[in-house]
Amino acid sequence: MTHEQLFGATPEGHWSAPGRVNLIGEHTDYNDGLALPMALPHTAKAAVSRRADRRLLLFSGWMPEAGPVDLDLDALAPGTVTGWAAYPAGVAWALREAGHDLGGLHISFESDVPVGAGLSSSAALEVVTALALSDLFDLGLAPAALARLARRAENDFAGVPSGILDQMASACCTAGHVLRLDTRDLGLRQIPFAMALEGLRLLVVDTRVRHAHADGAYAARRAECEAGATALGVPALRDIPIEGLAGALARLPDDTLRRRVRHVVTENDRVERVVALLDVGRAREIGPLLTAGHASLRDDFEVSCAELDLAVSASVAAGALGARMTGGGFGGSALVLVAEDTADATGTVRAAIEDAFAAAGHHPPRVFEAIPSSGAQRLPV
């Protein structure tokens, strides 16, 4: 159904915000660390019109049978909204908590960001809502400010203890680039990632194993990182330099904390090493760093799963330059970097992954190409 058919009102504008993949830098964002995300061409889109009252009506194009979710704008509070609607409703709440005056709204959403695939479908919903409301109510919020509001919606309203990586990627990425993000000060640097010019392709392997960031495993990893930082007497694990890692690990009495700390410190180092290679046009050499990052996430951080491990091992065995899980883990997607040096190298890697999944009795994965795309934007009429 169109926005007009749903609400009897013409949209005042259309906006979009992308999902993301993270080239390297996983579980570093809530440790004040570094990450290197890029936006996907897959987006959440919002059509918005204002109402004369104080109601907030939200409609999901991927669940049309449920009909609009009807909310009282003035009664929004953490825990009052569940399911997908908590993310855009949380943005409206966060904007009002920040002192911005909003009115009633109709918002109809469409999205082709795969849900539960570790590609930030929730952040895309949050950021597209934040941008639309900033534009409609003349709030003039910069992309980083939109991301901070979106994270507050996810953390405090929806109850998901995520970092800010997903929202910053959705709000701030640019086409043809990866984003070096310093999550401590939100410093940004756009780094060209011209894969086609270097004969590279980046594949996303959606294992179709669904995860939920709000479950206890994600929260437990965050708590373990905080415990490690406390034990080492630093504000965050970002403050442990790679040169001081061995000494820091020797001071930790608990093996689980040692492994969590080792992942975060070495992952920040991997981000810097990937950036250094991209800066000098040596993108083909980042593959082993991606694979090393996966091993760290699998063994030290323990957030992988059998399907993700199989996607990585099968693709590397078939000639990929490197591969790793991306996103929070416990399912979701893997990234695979392929050099097109032989005829249909990408097809060979894709077939190897699909054959390995079939042989293991897993559901067939969804495989598609990741192209560095634009961040959130208002769409032309």
Image (cartoon, rainbow, N blue to C red):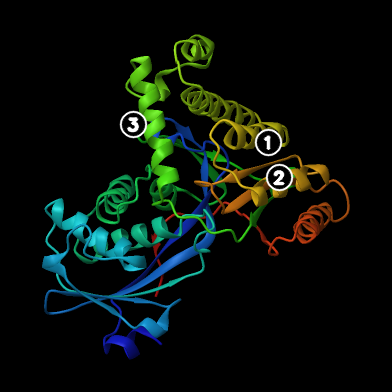
Up-down relation of residue 319 to residue 265 (above or below): below
Q: Is residue 50 left or right of residue 32?
A: left
At 34% across and 50% down in the image, what residue appears? 160
At 23% across and 54% down in the image, what residue appears? 140
Numbered circle sitting on residue 291? 1
Camera-nearest label, 1 or 3: 1
Provide the residue designation for mark 3. 185
Q: Quadrant of the N terminus?
A: bottom left
At 45% across and 76% down in the image, what residue appears? 62
Under circle 3, the secondary element is loop
User: In 3D space, how far apart are the residues under numbered discs 1 and 2 (Cα atoms)?
Assistant: 8 Å
Numbered circle sitting on residue 312? 2
Q: Where does the image place residue 222, in percent across and percent down from the top left?
A: 39, 36
Q: Where does the image place residue 286, in percent across and percent down from the top left?
A: 68, 33
Camera-nearest label, 2 or 3: 2
Instruction: Name the residue nearer the viewer: 175 or 149.
Output: 149
User: In 3D space, how far apart are the residues under numbered discs 1 and 3 (Cα atoms)?
Assistant: 28 Å
Task: Locate residue 80: give its quadrant.
Answer: bottom left
Under circle 1, the secondary element is helix
User: In 3D space, how far apart are the residues under numbered discs 2 and 3 (Cα atoms)?
Assistant: 33 Å
Instruction: Name the residue nearer the viewer: 134 or 293.
Output: 293
Asked if the residue under mark 2 is in contact with the one under mark 1, i.e. CB atoms within 8 Å, the reply is yes
